[in-house]
Image: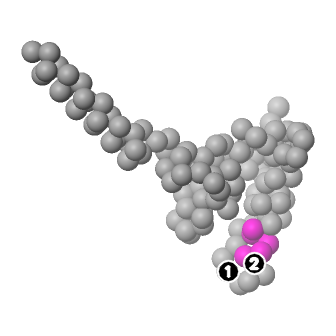
Amino acid sequence: MKKGLISIGILAVFLLSVLVVSGVFAQQAKDEYAIDNTFGQVKFGHKKHVDQKFECVKCHHELKDKKPGEAPKACNTCHKEKAEGKTPAAKDAFHKDCRGCHEEASKSKKPAGPTACNKCHNTTIKKK
């Protein structure tokens, strides 16, 4: 009887570890994110960027030395309203990375996202 329970326990632990490693319990990214700020809400099409085969590490730079399958952090985990030490403020990070990437793409004649303020920011929806 004890051997049977031990065997079932070992099997359950094994199956659970296989599920964890395979990413079944991994956090799934939403298709679109809304980023509220004082200038106006920005809608970010995560699925659209993933479908264009951008490397995750281009935006999720904290994954650079991580193992495959580790969940990325949300931008606002590190990038706050104001810069903290060497970590730039969210506004500065987004403008450098997002707008910078869009500008770079437009110079190389690749499909590019918007670079004008009112093309990203919906000024009717502002952070309070």
Q: Position of residue 109 (x, y in %)?
A: 71, 84
Please give the name of the residue rendered at 78% of the width and 81% of the height, measured from the top-left corner: 107
Vertical order, 99 against 91 (above or below): below
Vertical order, 100 against 62 (above or below): below
Q: Position of residue 90 (x, y in %)?
A: 81, 46
Residue situated furthest left in the rendering: 1
Q: Is residue 104 magenta?
A: yes
Residue 19 quadrant:
top left
Label 2 belongs to which residue?
Answer: 106
Please say if the residues under marks 2 and 1 sit with CB atoms less than 8 Å apart: yes
Please give the name of the residue rendered at 55% of the width and 68% of the height, measured from the top-left corner: 53
Q: Position of residue 64 (x, y in %)?
A: 65, 56
Graded by Cα atoms within 10 Å as few (under 14), some (14 to 19) or many (20 or more), the crowding at tag 1 reads few
Which of these two is toward me, 33 or 72? 72
Q: What residue range appears in magenta?
A: 101-105
Left-right relation of 52 to 111: left
Q: Which mark is residue 92?
A: none
Left-right relation of 88 to 111: right
Q: Position of residue 85 (x, y in %)?
A: 90, 41
Which of these two is toward me, 53 or 37? 53
Helix, strand or loop at mark 2? helix
Q: Which mark is residue 110?
A: 1
Quadrant (top left, top right, bottom left, bottom right) of the C terminus: top right
Vertical order, 106 against 10 (above or below): below
Left-right relation of 113 to 126: left
Magenta portion: prevailing SS class: helix
Quadrant (top left, top right, bottom left, bottom right) of the N terminus: top left
Residue situated furthest front in the rendering: 3
